[in-house]
Amino acid sequence: MGSAAATTAATTAAVAPTPVDDLATQTSTLAVQEEATKEDVAPHRSHDPTNNMKRSDPFQFGSRFLEQDDDVFEFNAWDHVETDDAYKEYSEQQFALQRQSPVSDFDKYRFNSDPAKWWNLFYKNNTANFFKNRKWLQQEFAILGEVTKEDAGPKIILEVGAGAGNTAFPILANNKNPKLKIHACDFSKKAVEVIRNHEAYNPESIQADVWDAASEELPPGLGESSVDVVVMVFIFSALSPRQWKQAVLNIHRVLKPGGEVCFRDYGRGDLTQVRFKKGRYLEENFYIRGDGTRVYFFEKDELAQIWSSGGVSSSEAMNDKPEEEQKPGEGEASEQTTPSTAVESESAALFDIEELGVDRRMLVNRALKLKMYRCWIQGRFRKK
Ligand SMILES: C[S@@+](CC[C@H](N)C(=O)[O-])C[C@H]1O[C@@H](n2cnc3c(N)ncnc32)[C@H](O)[C@@H]1O
């Protein structure tokens, strides 16, 4: 390993693995952006205040560009950064090590057979404040601004995997539309309890329900083609590849034609993926966190395929049993195969990919001169 790679390794080892640290880090990125406004402004582009927008609230993603003459360690965070070769090399080494020590069959069954149980535990152990409120959503997804306008008329938003309500409540707080209703669904009973106990919970404007996005039913109280906007923030990554197709079909069913999905999730090569240690690898790009919750890291093309044409896992294509039903030792094939393969016969176009972008950020520890790469994928999909 080269010295830069060693530095990256030191970086990844130094950050304590917490269940959804990626979310926490994302929040702290915003905090450090604000801190950076106190820096002197240098003449080149990345220091140009018109580019940086560090004081906007909510913060604007993707506004800090690293250019050739910049000192990487001058600010705490840079946007749209490509990973350097040392990090790529280090990542590949880590992935190889992870593959060598996968989760045991016994544990695969334990974690896959009842994923909601592990999220219930998560919400039992963490407060509603664990996830920071996602104020930036309305800025990133214009449709959320439109449906919350005073005269927008009757509109329904479905949030899938709503967790503690950190997306739903900020939308509600900005809402001026008396005819807006948010359905906040999660398959964790505990998460739904947290939302229902929130001080701003009012069944006239927000309804929280238990719903498994990968089940064969639609969310309580919602019929076919009834929803205007679906919001999915860091939930698709919690599904196993064998659940993607059903979830996409459910979203397709529940949305009105022309309805929009606002999507954000983890991208392949994110720091949190790279630093997974032994015994966390379930299958390619899919891991089990220390608290028993699962997380997948997506490629952009893979997501485009899944949403546009109902791409499905290869094991499903081979008619494997869903892993939730597999006993230890079954379903080995899924580990040997690439998760996302479109099945042409079923791939009637579902969604138009209106937008899909990779949000790469480099976080910098200026004191230790360390670089850490984060990677998220954000998109908008429209029901045909
Ligand atoms: C990383 S958290 C994100 C929570 C929330 N979207 C946010 O950004 O604050 C993932 C959420 O997805 C939920 N989840 C996982 N699998 C699900 C499924 N099959 N159906 C519905 N919700 C699910 C979990 O319970 C958890 O609340």
Image: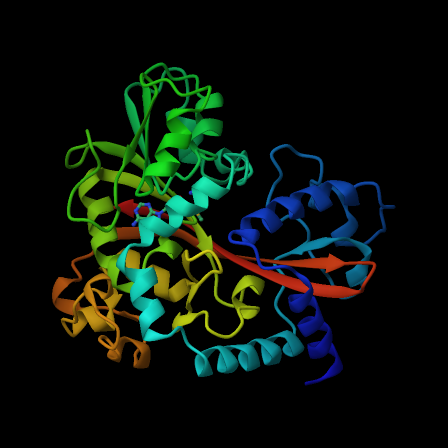
Would you say 87 lies left or right of 147 here? right
Residue 8 versus residue 23 in the image, above or below = below
Q: Position of residue 57 (x, y in %)?
A: 63, 32
**Quadrant placement of the N terminus:** bottom right
Q: Residue at x 71, y 71 (%)?
A: 10
Q: Position of residue 98 (x, y in %)?
A: 48, 77
User: From where the camera sits, is residue 70 visible?
Assistant: no
Would you say 165 lies left or right of 212 here? right
Quadrant of res 362: bottom right
Quadrant of res 73: bottom right
The answer to which of 273 and 35 lies nearer the viewer is: 273
Q: Position of residue 217 (x, y in %)?
A: 16, 43
Residue with the most extreme right position = 40
Q: Position of residue 337 (x, y in %)?
A: 30, 79
Would you say 301 lies left or right of 278 here? left
User: From where the camera sits, is residue 26 visible?
Assistant: yes
Residue 22 versus residue 232 in the image, above or below = below
Colour convention of the picture: rainbow
